[in-house]
Image (cartoon, rainbow, N blue to C red):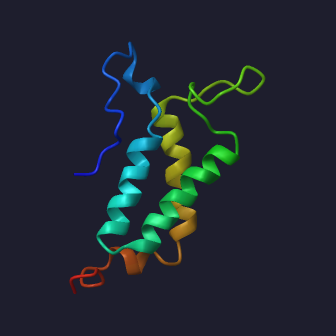
Amino acid sequence: MFQPIHGTAPDLKDPNMANPTGAILSGALLFETLGFVDAGRALRAAVEAAIRQGHRTGDLVQLSERSPLSATDFEYYVRNAFERATAKGMEAIAIPGSGPWS
């Protein structure tokens, strides 16, 4: 089972305001555990890139920064960074028979 240790934040009034970073990084760990190490690294790098570029959810935004993003908006920036990072190598990740059990 791969999930963030903190749970799903059911107490939030608006669940779209939860920080999805833990769940996304759990996906990176899943990739790595299944032998898709490059995909896991790319996903980690995508999260780091999004945060470095200033795309942050409310729990990471400082008062002097831009407005916080919803979970959906943050995921958009992470997905775009992941797609850019894997554009050339995505075929090796997605092709059936290319995994560790081939």
- Residue drawn at the location 41% of the way across and 58% of the way down: 28
Q: Farthest residue in the top direction?
A: 13
Q: Farthest residue in the right direction?
A: 64
Q: Position of residue 64 (x, y in %)?
A: 78, 23
- Residue drawn at the location 22% of the way across and 51% of the way down: 1
* Residue 81 visible (yes or no): no
- Residue drawn at the location 36% of the way across and 54% of the way down: 27
Q: Position of residue 12 (x, y in %)?
A: 38, 16
**Above or below for 25 versus 4:** below
Q: Quadrant of residue 32?
A: bottom left
Q: How many numbered markers are drawn?
A: 0
Q: Farthest residue in the front direction?
A: 5
Q: Position of residue 16 (x, y in %)?
A: 42, 26
Q: Quadrant of the C terminus?
A: bottom left
Drawn side of residue 13 relative to residue 85, left or right = left
Q: Position of residue 33 (x, y in %)?
A: 32, 67
Drawn side of residue 29 relative to residue 99, left or right = right
Q: Nearer the viewer, residue 72 or 62?
A: 62
Q: Quadrant of residue 99?
A: bottom left
Q: Quadrant of residue 81?
A: bottom right
Drawn side of residue 100 relative to residue 48, left or right = left
* Residue 13 visible (yes or no): yes
**Above or below for 6 versus 89:** above
- Residue drawn at the location 46% of the way across and 24% of the way down: 17
**Above or below for 51 versus 31:** above
**Above or below for 63 versus 23:** above
